[in-house]
Each structure stands twice: as C-alpha cells, then as structure tokens.
Amino acid sequence: MAPIHLHPRHRKPIPPKPVKKFWLSAYTFSVEEAGPIREPLVGLSVSDGTNWRFCVWISSGVILPGVKPKVTARDWAVFYNKDNQNAKETIYSGMNDKCPPTHYQVLNPITIDELVPDKNQTQIAIAKQMKDSFLVRFIIADGNDQDKERQGFMVEYPGVVPGDLIGKPFWGALHKEGDSIISPELHRALPATSYY
C-alpha cells in the first residue's frame, strides 16, 4: 500500500475513504532515448481532496511465460550501449509550468488506492497537442482483478511534444511514491514530500 500523506491541517494520517471525485494534476513529462528505444516518463499527482498520491508512469512489458521481456531505454543503455552512455532524457513538460487540475468523477465511490492500484497495467497516449499544452490519456486496469472497471481520463500537461508521439499508445504501469520498483533515478521525477 502506498504511504499515507499528512494533510497540513492534520497531525495524524487520514486513511483513504471511498469518494466519487478526484483531482488529477500534471507535473512532469519527459522522453528517454537509447538506441532504437524511445519512451515517455510521466509524472501525475492524484488527490481525493484529503490524501495525495504522487505517481510516475514508466514503460514496462507484461511478463508472460515464453514471451521475451520488453527492453526499456534504460535497459538498452546498460546492456547494449558500447559507448557506456546513459539513456538520454528530454523534458517536455516540467513543474515550473501550470495547467489546471482535471476533475475526474467515478460512478461508484472508490478509494484513491483503488483508482491507482498497486499492481496495475496502464496505457498512455498523447491524445491532442494544443497551442501551449497537450492532453495525455490514461487507461488504468487493476492487475490483480481483471473484472474491475477500468479507469480512463485525460490530463493536460503544459508544453509541446514531438509530433511523432501523438496518438502512439505506450504500455506500462503507474507507480506510487514509495514503491520499491521505482529506482532512485526515477524518484527525482517525484516532488519532495514529508514521506522522505
């Protein structure tokens, strides 16, 4: 389970309660490149009005018996790059720019941790480029329970992205702050909180 953040007005952690409304905010969008691989890293803040979850979307393949696992840009840089260089990261949207939060409402009340389950499969795609911002579509499926309703929403990110990324789907997972799978390098994409 993800850490419970302290609200400034409260001294004790507030356990998440089922709600219908959530607020989603963009805070970073970058692309990592190494060799033939080019994939996004996406930061997302989720709030239920009381609790917050800071998430980072990273590309990952579904591991199935007999199927070769997906190689990420970081993997390629480590295992196949003869020049011993790291994956190149280009930031297209950062925390200095602001976009209004997206209000997302569900039909049946769920907790913030059900909106972004610990084990999830999430598809993202840049849906539309506007003048000074772009829309990223998220579709989240619970990896533990395929019968659960999928959650889908769009979040506005400030900035301009390369045209060849628009409409291209990427598969991965949203990882919450505190997840052990997030490497120390990826933690820099998460805003500093009282948890660390």
Image (tube, rainbow, N blue to C red):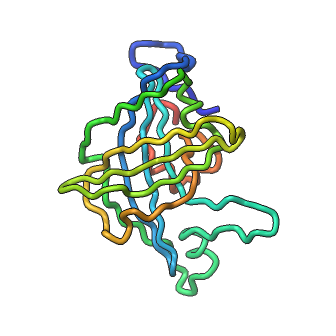
Horizontal side of 43 relative to 76 (left or right) equals: left
At 48% across and 42% down in the image, what residue appears? Answer: 152
Q: Quadrant of the N terminus?
A: top right
Residue 148, position as x, y percentages in the image:
64, 35
**Splitting the image into 4 quarters, where does residue 102 fall?**
top left
In the image, 158 versus 90, the foreground residue is: 158
**Splitting the image into 4 quarters, where does residue 16 fall?**
top right
Q: How many marks?
A: 0
Q: Which residue of the protein is positioned furthest toward the right in this rendering? A: 65
Horizontal side of 153 relative to 161 (left or right) equals: right
At 55% across and 37% down in the image, what residue appears? Answer: 116
Residue 168, position as x, y percentages in the image:
44, 65
At 46% across and 47% down in the image, what residue appears? Answer: 138
Residue 120, position as x, y percentages in the image:
62, 45
Horizontal side of 50 relative to 142 (left or right) equals: left
In this view, 179 is above or below 41: above
At 24% across and 53% down in the image, what residue appears? Answer: 133
In the image, 31 versus 67, the foreground residue is: 67
In this view, 90 is above or below 142: below
In the image, 54 versus 125, the foreground residue is: 125
Residue 90, position as x, y percentages in the image:
36, 66
Horizontal side of 23 relative to 17 (left or right) equals: left
Q: Which residue of the protein is positioned furthest toward the bottom in this rendering? A: 82
